[in-house]
Amino acid sequence: MPDWLNISIFALTQIVMLVGLFGLLVPLFPGTVVMWLAALGYGVVSGFSTLGIILFVIITLLMLLGTVVDNILVGAGARQGGASWTTIAVGLIAGVLGTLIIPPLGGLIAAPLAVLLLEYQRTGDMRQAWASLRGMATGWGLSILVRFGIGFLMMVLWWVWAWQG
């Protein structure tokens, strides 16, 4: 492949990787999936060497981890704050539906509102409802940090692949 084409493919993949990485700072944005798709596209266009296959498998595992860690940490935070499992499930569904109906902010409004209202309705105690919401927010913040770290690691592995391949 000509150098200009290799540079163009690298640059385009890097841009998509950065969109995915910084998209991880936005709750409910599938940044790790975007980054995985960028790596897959790079492999399809540039070819999969042995190192490329190994690194792509690791990138795939990290993408899977990044997609579930968000729900685990948010749910654990809400649970630690006293929320019921039903409230956590409804909050997750409300977040997804809110994002689909009013992207990108709908989920940021719907999920916390659902948790607050359901916990108040369940317990009759606004302080407990707020504690559940604070727990969810803490889990959300932690999940953003963890997902960003996972995304950065995915990008570093892709750099190794691109520079060694």
Image: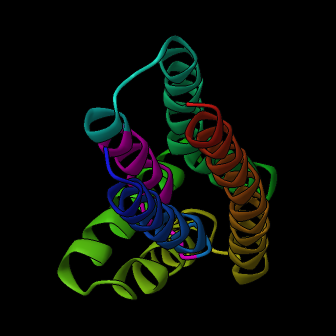
Is 78 in front, or is 5?
5
- Determine the image quadrant of residue 92: bottom left
In this rendering, the answer to whether 57 lies above or below 10 is: above
- For the stretch drawn in magenta, what is the main secondary structure? helix
Is 73 in front, or is 37?
37
Q: If the image is split into quadrants, where does the N terminus sit?
A: top left
Q: Is residue 109 magenta?
A: no
Question: Could you say where residue 108 lies in the image, as x and y percent from the top left?
Answer: 48, 81
Q: Residue at x 39, y 22 (%)?
A: 48
Q: Residue at x 70, y 56 (%)?
A: 143
- Determine the image quadrant of residue 132: bottom right
Question: Could you say where residue 54 lies in the image, as x and y percent from the top left?
Answer: 56, 15
In this rendering, the answer to whether 165 lies above or below 111 is: above
Q: Residue at x 68, y 73 (%)?
A: 133
Which residue is outermost to the top?
50
Residue range corresponding to the magenta coloring: 26-42
- Determine the image quadrant of residue 157: top right
Question: Could you say where residue 160 lies in the image, as x and y percent from the top left?
Answer: 68, 38
In this rendering, the answer to whether 31 lies above or below 103 is: above
Is 80 in front, or is 157?
157
Asked if residue 90 lies left or right of residue 120, the reply is left
Q: Is residue 35 magenta?
A: yes
Q: If the image is split into quadrants, where does the C terminus sit?
A: top right
